Image: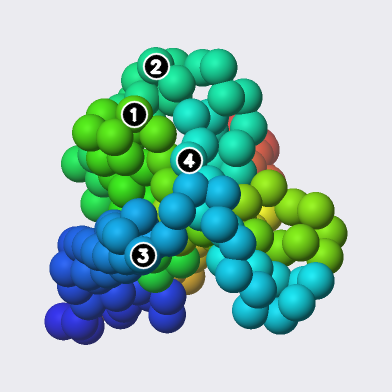
């Protein structure tokens, strides 16, 4: 009896990997936000690469990257719906492919991080500011969510198709010897029991004469 072959992208401990990724993202996000709130004043900007990348303390009431700032309650509900959907999918599908596991962990950790800010502080703390391209200020949670969604989209487009382990192998599987022998005997008996139409006609003509 052959052992079950594992898929090349499958993780041995997918649930543990998911929780590690989600918790690391959440911890880093909350630690950085706490340090920013404790050491910087709102609106303060510290250049890391002057004119390219700054650390800027912004309180955001909108979605990721400061989008749609007037819909704060909707974003809380939306984040909760996303988390419930991830939990339901995991319960039903039990994914093991590492791109899916890591992507869901990133999205979960990022979503929880921003929900904590919205529920307990009323606003999300943003810090990373690419001034070179005038990009909205964002945080670690936003980055994790975007990377996770990107991985899922890439997986949907480029994921290898699952092998048909049942159909193709079954079609070429040789018959057991007992079945082959019985099949051959039944074929021979049917051939021997069947009459040749030409010989039976000749015999009838001889008898008539």
Between the residue at mark 4 and the residue at mark 1, the CA separation in whole angstroms equals 9 Å
Between the residue at mark 3 and the residue at mark 2, the CA separation in whole angstroms equals 28 Å
- Disc 3: which residue: 39
Q: Residue at x 32, y 48 (%)?
A: 113
Are the residues flagged by discs 2 and 4 in contact, CB closer than 8 Å? Answer: no
Image side of residue 133 versus residue 78, left or right? right
Quick one: label 4 or label 1, which is nearer the N terminus? 4
Image side of residue 207 versus residue 141, left or right? right
Between the residue at mark 4 and the residue at mark 3, the CA separation in whole angstroms equals 14 Å
- Crowd class of label 4 (few under 14; some 14 to 19; many from 20; radius 10 Å): some
Between the residue at mark 3 and the residue at mark 1, the CA separation in whole angstroms equals 19 Å
Quick one: label 3 or label 1, which is nearer the N terminus? 3
Foreground mark, 4 or 3? 3
Secondary structure beneath disc 2? helix
Quick one: label 3 or label 2, which is nearer the N terminus? 3
Tell me residue 106's x, y (percent): 39, 58
Q: Does 38 appear above or below 2?
A: above
- Disc 2: which residue: 73
Front residue of 117/179: it is 117
- Crowd class of label 3 (few under 14; some 14 to 19; many from 20; radius 10 Å): few
Which quadrant of the figure contains the N terminus? bottom left
Tell me residue 49's x, y (percent): 71, 80
**Mark drawn on residue 122:** 1
Quick one: label 4 or label 3, which is nearer the N terminus? 3
Are the residues flagged by discs 2 and 1 in contact, CB closer than 8 Å? Answer: no
Secondary structure beneath disc 4? strand
Residue 176 seen in render? no
Q: Does 201 appear above or below 32?
A: above
Residue 5 seen in render? yes
Tell me residue 47's x, y (percent): 65, 73
């Amino acid at each position: 009896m052959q052992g079950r072959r594992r898929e090349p992208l499958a993780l041995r401990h997918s649930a543990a990997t998911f929780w590690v990724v989600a918790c690391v993202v959440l911890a880093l996000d909350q630690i950085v936000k706490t340090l920013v709130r404790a050491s910087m004043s709102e609106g303060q900007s510290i250049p890391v690469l002057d004119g390219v990348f700054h650390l800027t303390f912004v309180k955001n009431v909108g979605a990721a990257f400061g989008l749609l700032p007037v819909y704060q309650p909707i974003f809380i509900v939306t984040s909760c719906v996303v988390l419930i959907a991830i939990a339901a999918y995991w319960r039903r599908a039990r994914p093991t492919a590492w791109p899916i596991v890591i992507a869901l962990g990133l999205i979960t950790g990022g979503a929880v991080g921003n929900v904590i800010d919205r529920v307990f502080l009323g606003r999300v703390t943003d810090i990373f500011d690419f001034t070179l391209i005038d990009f909205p200020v964002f945080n670690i949670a936003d980055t994790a969510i975007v990377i996770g969604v990107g991985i899922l989209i890439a997986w949907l487009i480029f994921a290898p198709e699952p092998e048909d382990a049942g159909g193709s192998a079954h079609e070429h599987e040789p018959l057991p010897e007992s079945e082959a022998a019985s099949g051959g005997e039944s074929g021979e008996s049917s051939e021997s029991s069947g009459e040749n139409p030409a010989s039976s006609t000749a015999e009838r003509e001889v008898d008539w004469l």
